[in-house]
Image (cartoon, rainbow, N blue to C red):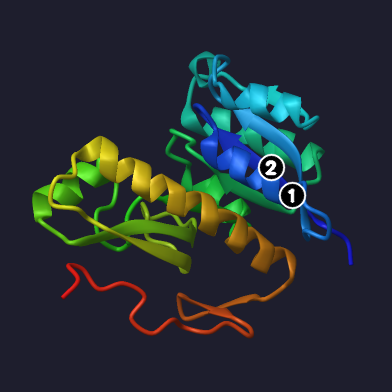
Amino acid sequence: MARLRVAVLISGRGSNLQALLDACGEGGFPAEIVLVLSNRPDAAGLDRARRAGVPTRILDHKVFASREAFDEAMDGLLRTASADLVCLAGFMRLLTPGFVQAWQDRLINIHPSLLPSFKGLHTHRQALDAGVTIHGCTVHFVTADLDAGPILVQAAVPVHPDDDEDSLAARVLEAEHRIYPLALRWLGEGRISTENNRVRVSNGTAAIYPLINPAA
């Protein structure tokens, strides 16, 4: 079975990109990264890709007259790379409905909250302000609605009484690095199906009480 050809879109340091690169470097992993594209020339994640021998492209959004023009150029690069799937990994651009439609069911993102809670930016601040005791992250399919696509997998982490945004973000990031490669593996193995906005994972099982916080 051919490996899934994956393009990763980044804007910054690329820590989730590194998790995906590491996973794809493992023997028998069912996906390979064929392109890393950034809208920022100074994105540190580009160096991660180059060290891994993955082709990179820079598409500076500032030189385009519109979001539509930028997304059209990006779409062309992705198709030239023969990408089967696009992973957003800290890509700080809102995608146009036309781009999302063109890549429907082939476009995934990782978001630092347990969706549908805390959409948008500053999720860790939102969680702390809300006083939740459990926070986490979500890998989901991208739709035209912000942070609202079908959920592939989630991971929960405890919120500690003395947490600030930085400490909570670090704990969530560790979970992100675990579930993004997991979602990619499932997609590469053909184990994912979607029906009525819900994702089904063949041969998947649900954990019983994965986290109770605070502990008794």
23 up-or-down from 79: above or below: below
Q: Is residue 210 left or right of residue 25?
A: left
What numbered label is drawn on residue 96?
A: none
| Quadrant of the rendering where the N terminus is positioned | bottom right
Q: Which residue is mark 2?
A: 21
Residue drawn 24% across and 45% down? 124
Residue 90 on image: x %, y %: 47, 37
Q: Is residue 121 visible?
A: no
63 up-or-down from 94: above or below: above
Residue drawn 62% across and 35% down? 72
Q: Secondary structure at mark 1?
A: helix
The local crowd at label 1, few if under 14, some if 14 to 19, many if 20 or more residues have their Cα within 10 Å, is many
Along the line of sight, which residue is nearer the eye, 142 or 133?
A: 133
Q: Which residue is mark 1?
A: 24
Q: Amino acid at mark 2?
A: Leu
Q: Secondary structure at mark 2?
A: helix
Along the line of sight, which residue is nearer the eye, 159 or 180?
A: 159
Q: Is residue 157 left or right of residue 108?
A: left
Question: Are the two marked residues, 1 and 2, in contact with CB atoms closer than 8 angstroms?
Answer: yes
Which of the 4 image quarters holds residue 113?
bottom left
Extreme residue in the front direction: 216
Residue drawn 37% across and 54% down? 147
Residue 208 on image: x %, y %: 38, 85
Q: Is residue 171 left or right of residue 10?
A: left
Residue 35 on image: x %, y %: 73, 36
